[in-house]
Image (spheres, helix red, strand yellow):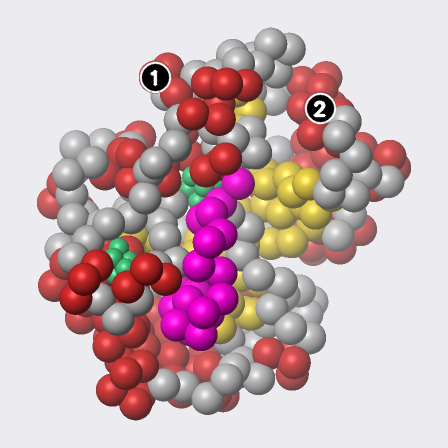
């Protein structure tokens, strides 16, 4: 992305004066440390009220990148889909990724992990929890069911079945009971279900893209409802210079997670799902529904964890949407 375009997008985001969040994603954003530095410096020099984060596979983490993130207060999200053998199969570079996590731990940099849930790793979530448990700096983990877009478009055999998502979530729940107690690591979907069951957050939108308050900016200047839809011509909403605001706001209108809600413990308090995933996954039964139901069932069975001692790690920074 040219620097002038990055500046234009940031200036637009800052123009309302309201706080905003900048998520640098790819591809792999750490391939462009100079651009990360430019974005961080631009925001901090202007003193805009912004949080900044990168989502990385951690394979290129080194001292210089860590210093850069600390200098500009850039949060780090790492994509880890399983223990090293699963990570190697799904993403490659597992050794470098876990070395990157270790470097972040040595520098006491807090990290949030996102795991893409597919038919390949759904049976290995217990091992994922154990692999993450050895890192003291991982504040939280989230499960993101595979989105059928980009390279995954049409690969329906990679989508986790309802049964696989249900049993995977049950395994993960069981493992995270111990991991959460021992380390304070939080599981995003568990926290969402707990909050929903306690009556909180029921009317919230799942993310800012639901209401057109998110903008994905392509390196060519095109804009989309969020990063997930980047480059999809059917989701184009103009350019940074000429944004089609009405179109942007309408993309995910009415896109809501649905299932057999009458038989669900969450009832009308469902935490919801990523509308972009719902859009691309179409008729595929939503794995997120199976995850939530599995968690709710485990909690109801009295298997709930104690509250995660997040204060021991300074609290969870939450998850960027
Ligand atoms: S988890 Fe599924 S079944 Fe339960 S309330 Fe949400 S959409 Fe409905
Ligand atoms: S949750 Fe989904 S729709 Fe919302 S910003 Fe993230 S990828 Fe986009």
Indicate the position of residue 134 as horizontal and vertical percent values. Answer: 48, 78
Q: Residue under circle 1?
A: 234
Q: Nearer the viewer, residue 289 or 5?
A: 289
Q: Which quarter of the rendered picture does the N terminus lie within?
A: top right
Q: Could one spot residue 72 in this view of the protein? A: yes
Q: Residue under circle 2?
A: 12
Task: Reply above or below: 221 against 177.
Answer: above
> Which region of the structure is painted magenta?
188-208
Indicate the position of residue 38 as horizontal and vertical percent values. Answer: 75, 32
314 inside magenta stretch = no
Tell me, for residue 71, which label it has, or none. Answer: none
The residue tagged with tag 1: helix, strand or loop?
A: helix
Q: Nearer the viewer, residue 182 or 241?
A: 241
The residue tagged with tag 2: helix, strand or loop?
A: helix
Left or right: where 34 falls relative to 305: right
Q: How many marks?
A: 2
Quarter where residue 262 is shown: bottom left
């Amino acid at each position: 992305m040219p620097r002038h375009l990055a500046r234009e997008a940031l200036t637009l985001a800052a123009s309302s004066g309201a706080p905003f969040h900048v998520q640098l994603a790819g591809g792999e954003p750490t391939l462009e440390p100079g651009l990360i530095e430019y974005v961080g410096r631009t925001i901090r020099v202007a003193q805009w009220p912004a949080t900044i984060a990168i989502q990385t596979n951690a394979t290129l983490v080194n001292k210089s990148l860590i210093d850069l993130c600390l200098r500009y207060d850039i949060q780090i999200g790492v994509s880890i889909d399983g223990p090293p053998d699963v990570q190697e199969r799904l993403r490659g570079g597992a050794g470098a990724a876990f070395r990157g996590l270790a470097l972040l731990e040595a520098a006491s940099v807090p990290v949030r992990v996102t795991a893409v849930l597919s038919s390949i790793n759904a049976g290995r979530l217990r091992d994922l929890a154990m692999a993450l448990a050895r890192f003291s700096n991982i504040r939280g983990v989230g499960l993101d069911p595979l989105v059928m877009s980009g390279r995954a478009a049409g690969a329906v055999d990679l989508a986790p079945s309802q049964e696989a998502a249900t049993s995977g979530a049950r395994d993960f729940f069981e493992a995270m009971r111990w991991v959460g107690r021992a380390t304070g690591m939080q599981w995003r979907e568990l926290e969402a279900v707990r909050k929903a069951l306690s009556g909180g957050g029921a009317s919230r939108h799942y993310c800012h893209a639901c209401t057109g308050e998110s903008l994905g900016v392509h390196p060519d200047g095109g804009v989309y409802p969020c990063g997930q839809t980047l480059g999809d011509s059917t989701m184009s909403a103009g350019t940074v210079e000429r944004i089609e605001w009405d179109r942007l706001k309408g993309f995910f209108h009415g896109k809501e997670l649905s299932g057999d809600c009458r038989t669900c413990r969450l009832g009308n308090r469902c935490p919801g799902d990523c509308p972009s995933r719902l859009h691309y996954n179409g008729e595929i039964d939503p794995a997120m529904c199976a995850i939530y139901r599995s968690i709710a069932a485990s909690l109801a069975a009295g298997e709930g964890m104690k509250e995660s001692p997040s204060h021991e790690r300074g609290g969870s920074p939450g998850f960027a949407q």
